[in-house]
Structures are given as C-alpha cells and as structure tokens.
Image (cartoon, rainbow, N blue to C red):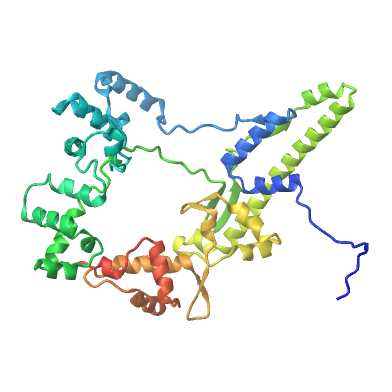
Amino acid sequence: MDLKAGLWQKQTLKLAMTQELSQAIALLQYSAQELAAFLEAKSMENPLIQVDFKNITTFDSSMDRTRKTLKKTFERDQKNLIEQIGSSESETLENYLLSQLNLLHVTPEEKQILHVLIETIDENGYLKDDLTKRLNQPEEAVNSVLKKLKALDPAGIAARDLQECLLLQLERKNPTPENELSKRIIAEHFLLFAEKKWKALAKMLSIDIKDIQKVHDYVQQLNPKPGAIFQREKPAYIVPDVVVKRDGEELSVSVFDALIPKISFNEGYYRQLSNHKDQEVNKFLQEKQGDFQWIQRSLEQRKETLLKVSMKIIEKQREFFLIGPAHLNPMTMREVAEELEIHESTVSRTVREKYMQTPAGTYELKYFFTSAVQTTENDQASSQKVKAAIEAYIKEENKQKPVSDQDIVEMLKEREGMVVSRRTVAKYRDQLGIPSSSKRKRFD
C-alpha cells in the first residue's frame, strides 16, 4: 500500500443546517399552543416584533352560555350558599378520610399515625409505602391503626394491592352464599381466577364452572380504584388546526388559526432607532428586521404546507368524508410526500399534534395515514377497516362460543375479501384492547 502525504483540492456540495433552517423545521411541527408560546418568546427578545393576542379568546367551560342562565345560577347559588360550604365538589380523598377520624376512638398517638398513613395513600386509594420503619412504631401498633383506617369509607381504601382491595369490599357485603364463595376464591385462588383458568379452579373447589361465572359477575360490581371517585380532572378541549366542511358532494378545507396570535412590525420603534447614526444600532435593527421577516415567511409557509397536506388527505380519503369513518383508504406519508414533491419528514412534522375537524368528528391528522392490507381481488384495504371489522365480529359473537383469531381470519376473507394472518388479527385485537377468545368466554 502506497501511503503519501500531500495537499489536494476537492469540491463538494453540502447542505448546512443553519439556525434559521433549524427554527423553520421546528416551527412547522409546533402545535397552535406551542407556536403561540414561541411567538411570545420571540417578541420578548425582538423589540421590532409586535404580538397581538386580541384575536385569542379563552374558553371557560364553567361559564354559562347565556345571561339568562347566569342569572338563574346566581339566584340558586344565593339561596344555597350555606349548603355549598364544604361542598363535595372540592373535596379530596385525603380530606374525606380526615373528616372521619373524629368518629374513631383512637389515642393521640394513633391519630398521628393515621394522619401519616392517609398522606401516603395514592390517588386510587392504595397504600403503597411500608411505613413501619419510618413511623418508628411497633409493627403491631401500626397494623392496629391500619385496620381502623381500612374500616373507613369508601370501602376498599388503604389496600396494598387489588386482591386486598376486593376482599375489603366483599367483607362489607351481606353474608350470602355468593359473597362467601367470592371471598374464598379471591383470598385463596386469586391468580387462577384472574387468569380465567376456571376449569382447573372448578375442579379444585368441586363446584360448577357456572358458579365461578356468577362470582366473576359479582366481583365486576366492585370498585378496583375506590379513591378515583375523588379525582375530578378538568376535561381537555381539542381545538382543530384544520376544518373540513361538506356541501352536498363538495368538500372544502380551511386552516383554523384563531389560536395563533397575529404578529406585526413595530414601525414606530424602528424609525425611532434609525435616527441614531450608530453602526451597532443599525446592525441590530437589520438583524431584528430580518428575524421578523423570517418568522413572517415561516408562518405563511407553515400555513401553506398544512393546507396542502390537508387537501391531499381529503383527495385521497374522499370516501371517509362522504360515507363515514369505516371507509378509510390505505395511505402513507411517503405517498403524500411524493405527490406533493416534498420530503416525507416534512409531512410527518406537518401532521404532528394537529387535528382536523370533520363532519364525522375531530381526528388527529395522523389517523388518516394507515397501512395497506391485501384483498382477494388484488385490491388494498386500510388497517382501520380491518380493525373495524374485527371489532364488529367480536361484538356480535356468541359469548358462550367466542370466535377465535383463526375464525376471524376466515371471516375477513369470506365476508370482506381481506387477506390477513392470524398474527395480524391478534395484533389488531390487542391494539383495540380486546382480550383473547378464552378470556371472553362466558359459562352461563
């Protein structure tokens, strides 16, 4: 091998990732909320950018829609003012448990332990931590106090796992034969029962499998998360980025940018600083003016790209908008990118965390991109169609003889003309949150 040291000239073409290009890519994938936060941050560092939030109105779900309703609500609130004090609307699980301590006959030391135990209960009502060492109290004393805590409402509170939670609730039920059998099965054979190995369990207990089915239905009435009833999360509202309207057979699309603040150039501030004959000031103005122009162009390009991708979705998913969600055609991001002559990553960034409002509801833009499934007629169907068919078959099945994954494969081929493997059916069924046929079977 001939190794020599030397100098050579070589001409290459490279694409440099400038700061502006990097920010333009980030701007494209921003959601409406992220974009508003970005523009606000830019206005703080660039005095030539004016951000107008006047077009954005905050939606308060607690407000009534009409003044008449507001007046009635006010009158009702005035009458029931005393009743509303300590209302359960703002009550937490911890406060509810603490309010019951006065009804217990406990010593000051036990009450202190109860306070610590209640503080460690999670939002579902379970006691996760082992506090015996932390409390620096004898194990017998802690267990005695814990027993009193478990006797409080709601039933099943302060359990360490699901098995104990169910048992605590069963112990408060009336001592019927069904309840006694349920307690025995949950206490002694919980895993076999949960994994639905009921034939072995029935043989072990010398009972009919139908009795286990009754226990299953009985246990289904219990609450696996007794503390969750105190969790009152505010509903999350999805504001669409694109709106599709239908007029007969015609479809129209528009970008909904009401949540994006308007930006404008601060001409007065620019003229004021331009009067200074300072080289550094002029350089600063040129830089910030260019920054404003870049953001303005990027916003226009973002809107244009979002509109183009949305129009292509409508074009290729026309049956979805005219007939219904069950008629979703297979479509990939690469396919859309090639037809729009843009990069696939651009399509991916465009649809990220963005939603489309349609006559059939509001969907995430990613929802419209589905893989293809081969059909018997050498055509293609979307994976969403296959999932919808699987869900329909299982919904209509005989629960005493549920259809297996292989049965579904045959049904899809014969009824829908869709060719899929048993493994694919199992994967789609798992994605739909549907258990296997052995766990769906009922023994009535």
Q: Is residue 269 left or right of residue 232?
A: right
| Residue 150 locus on image (x, y percent) | 19, 39
Q: Quadrant of residue 300?
A: top right
Image quarter (top left, top right, bottom left or bottom right) of the N terminus: bottom right
Q: Quadrant of residue 430?
A: bottom left
Q: Residue at x 42, y 68 (%)?
A: 427
- Residue nearer the viewer, 202 or 398: 202
Q: Residue at x 36, y 65 (%)?
A: 391
Q: Quadrant of residue 184?
A: bottom left
- Residue nearer the viewer, 149 or 125: 149
Q: Is residue 82 visible?
A: yes
Q: Is the residue 128 above or below the residue 84 in the image?
A: below
| Residue 292 locus on image (x, y percent) | 75, 36
- Residue nearer the viewer, 156 or 146: 146
Q: Is the residue 365 above or below the residue 282 in the image?
A: below
Image quarter (top left, top right, bottom left or bottom right) of the C terminus: bottom left
Q: Is residue 323 left or right of residue 414?
A: right
- Residue nearer the viewer, 388 or 86: 86
Q: Residue at x 31, y 35 (%)?
A: 134
Q: Is residue 123 left or right of residue 367?
A: left
Q: Is residue 222 visible?
A: no
Tally the numbered discs.
0
| Residue 243 locus on image (x, y percent) | 55, 48
Q: Residue at x 54, y 32 (%)?
A: 57
